[in-house]
Amino acid sequence: MIGMAGFERLRDPRFSWLLGLAGCLVVALVFSYFHTGDFLSRKILDRQFNFLHQRAHPIQTDVVIVGIDEESFKEFKEPFELWHPHLASFLQAMRTAKPRVVGLDIALPQQSYQFMLPHYGEGMVKALQALSAETPVVLARKLDGGGGLRPVDVALASSVDEALASVALCVDADGVLRRFDLNRCTVNAQGTSFTEKIAARLGVMQPGIGLVDYSAGQKFDYIPFSRVLEWQGQADMQRLRETFSGKAVLLGIVSARAEKVRVPVPMAVWSPMDRRVPEVLVQAQILRSMTGNGLVREITLWGGACLALASALFWLGRSGWIKLAALVVTSVVFWLLAAWMLASGIYLPLGGMLISGLFAFIARLGYESILQMRDRKGLRELFGSYVNREILGEIVSGKIDSNQEGERVRVCLLHARISGFSKRVQEEAPQTTVFLLNEYFSQMAIAVHQHQGTLDRFAGSDLVAFFGAPKALESPERSALEAAQEMLLRQREVNGSLQAGGIRGIEIEIALHVGQVVVGRIGSLARKEYTAIGSAVDVVDALVELAGSTGYPVVCSAEVAEAVRSAGGISVVGERFVGGENLQVYGWTPPVLGGL
């Protein structure tokens, strides 16, 4: 019993509506907890960064990149591992230029090679010591093929106290670098990174973790490594100081040999469409973020969950173009809001919210589709045996308002019955009676449906129908008269079928009347029928009682008679007291019957 009660509750639209809303809220929380929208959030974030990056302004005191390009590799013939003298010249140039900090984002020599070339690396060590005595220097420790830190020549490492730092970067699941958080791919790495140590020497202590601000600054250009050495060789102190003095300088490889990192936006002037950029550019952008407005902070998990829950409210309200437009407009507004917040240093992930909102929208659409299917099924069950297929299709499609709750309409009522049927029931076998009625009602129902009438009820041999509801007709009276004529014609077919089985034929009596009635779905909780009620129904029920005594197959009231006068065959029977009122009664013999 409890199970059936629960099932019945599910059929209650209010309960199923609340259940759907609760389901959307739960799904939104699940999406938020499992980061279901992260992929979409990342794609949106990339578009927002591109939008902001295209509108970025130059930074007054920007990071300067000295790039080791292909021209530098062509000019210096030695293998890069033996560039000690060239790197020493660069360090001497930096000492002359007096930058605020220097970062060497290159694979430093692992040994001095003095066993091959005595005193070969001493110049670089001395230059590094001299520079670090005046200017902070940070040396990068690159990763080897196994993901571990490569060793650095002991002499170089000892020249800069605690200035060795990892350049490891932790990319997102799609391989794109968006965040600065070494703890995502290493252990206890906070404070040990290349950019953190440079930022500390620029006065930014503990920059924390967050998203790299790719909207900070324009695309990077670089000063060729060979040009810096050329200025140093020419003792061009003025050019060196104009270019580097008071700035953060990063040295790195920018040629095709460089380690490349995927980023959300193109960052290189020399490759304006490429989102795979040399690693030194990424380090420079992280440094821009740390020393500018700071790393971009992401809202908390609970904040994202609240947004997802709010978007689940798209379950509310009926589906349609307006709701779809509201969903689109809301998405655009939040995109712009998130872009503005991103420019202000706060990241608002939209993926979970948008997916939750879309899920709620689609769920509501599905819910309404199920209700419509159920309503259509109910309409088919209710009207399928009352009206013809054409009218049923219009009711189901909504072209005809069935108004099951009830309405007052003007209809023409038809009441037909078999003359002397009660006596026949007593005389004939039950099987004969059932066969007779089934043959009779089958043919009469066809006649009613062919003329767009609605079957009301069968009782004994009585058939009641009405014309004008649920489908409005131009002339319900004419449709009813045509149906009555069709019924009389089909009576002959019924008689032929009965006589072939050795059963006596039938004579039918038909009454027609026009009036206001109430039509609707009436009955008990277990069973309801679409029917007509009102005084006009009582009149037509009483009118059919007169049919047998008038000598006419069809009797009708005055309004019905007016509709058939042009067809002929109408006669005045006279005034009769019918259904509690005096009524002018007419008899009609359809002319078409005379020739059959």
Image (cartoon, helix red, strand yellow):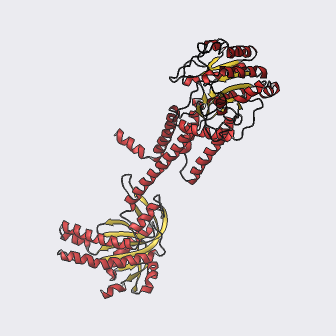
Is residue 69 visible in the rendered image? The answer is yes
| Horizontal side, residue 54 vs residue 392: left or right | right
Residue 543 placed where, x, y %? 38, 75
| Horizontal side, residue 255 vs residue 513: left or right | right
In what quadrant of the picture does the N terminus appear? top left
- Residue at 39% of width from left, 45% of height from top? 8
Residue 584, above or below 355:
below
Q: Nearer the viewer, residue 418 or 577?
A: 418
Q: Nearer the viewer, residue 96 or 261?
A: 96
Work out which residue is located at the far right of the displayed protein and give it.
238
Residue 176, above or below 381:
above
Is residue 290 visible in the rendered image? The answer is no
| Horizontal side, residue 559 vs residue 549: left or right | right
Q: Nearer the viewer, residue 469 or 329?
A: 329
Q: Nearer the viewer, residue 174 or 506?
A: 174
Residue 430 placed where, x, y %? 19, 66
Residue 449, above or below 157:
below
Residue 58 placed where, x, y %? 75, 35
Residue 413 placed where, x, y %? 41, 71
Residue 188, above or below 402:
above
Q: Quadrant of residue 295?
A: top right
- Residue at 66% of width from left, 16% of height from top? 163
Total marks placed: 0
Q: Quadrant of residue 509?
A: bottom left
